[in-house]
Amino acid sequence: MAANLSARKLQIDALSAEAADYAHCFLTVDCGAELCERGRTYPVGGLAGVYPGLKLGEILKRMRCTACGGALISARLLTARPGQKHARWVELVGPAVQGPRRD
Ligand SMILES: [Zn+2]
């Protein structure tokens, strides 16, 4: 229970922060299209340069797959710092956050 609350807080903190604040992290995104590469990873510092001044949540809404142009169906943040032993994944977008998809 506490772990879930903690993950939710990390998610909200990350989505509402400017990307530059997470410049040391890596973002792995997926458009879900069958023919596209799974789990493309970008340094958040690079994204902060492409989308200056935007919050991470706003960038995720704007990002499109470089291959098919589709929106993201999943995104997660690897909060690794240089020399950090306990990097962790924070789910930002996707089934783990949004729950099962409704048809
Ligand atoms: Zn794609």
Image: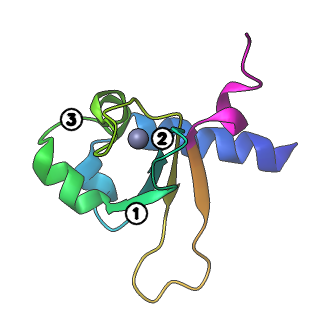
Name the disc covering residue 26, or none.
1
- Position of residue 72 in the picture relative to residue 93 (left or right): left
Residue 101 shown in magenta:
yes
**Dot 1 amino acid type:** Phe
Q: Find the residue positioned furthest to the right.
A: 1
Quadrant of the rendering where the N terminus is positioned: top right
Q: Hey, which quadrant is residue 42 in on the image?
A: bottom left
Quadrant of the rendering where the C terminus is positioned: top right
Residue placed under numbered mark 3 in the picture:
54
Name the disc covering residue 57, or none.
none
In front here: 102 or 51?
102
Q: Secondary structure at mark 2?
A: helix
Residue 75 is situated, as x and y percent measured from the top left of the image, at 50, 44
**Highlighted range, magenta:** 92-103
The answer to whether the beta carbon of the residue marked 3 is less than 8 Å from any atom of ligand 1 is no
Residue 60 is situated, as x and y percent measured from the top left of the image, at 36, 35
**Dot 2 amino acid type:** Asp
- The vertical placement of 54 against 25, above or below, is above
Q: Hey, which quadrant is residue 4 in on the image?
A: top right
**Mark 2 surroundings within 10 Å by alpha-carbon count, few (fewer than 14), some (14 through 19), many (20 or more):** few
The residue at 74%/12% (across/down) is 102
State the CA–CA distance, disc 1 to disc 2.
Answer: 16 Å
State the CA–CA distance, disc 3 to disc 1.
Answer: 16 Å
The answer to whether the beta carbon of the residue marked 1 is less than 8 Å from any atom of ligand 1 is no
- Position of residue 16 in the picture relative to residue 44 (left or right): right
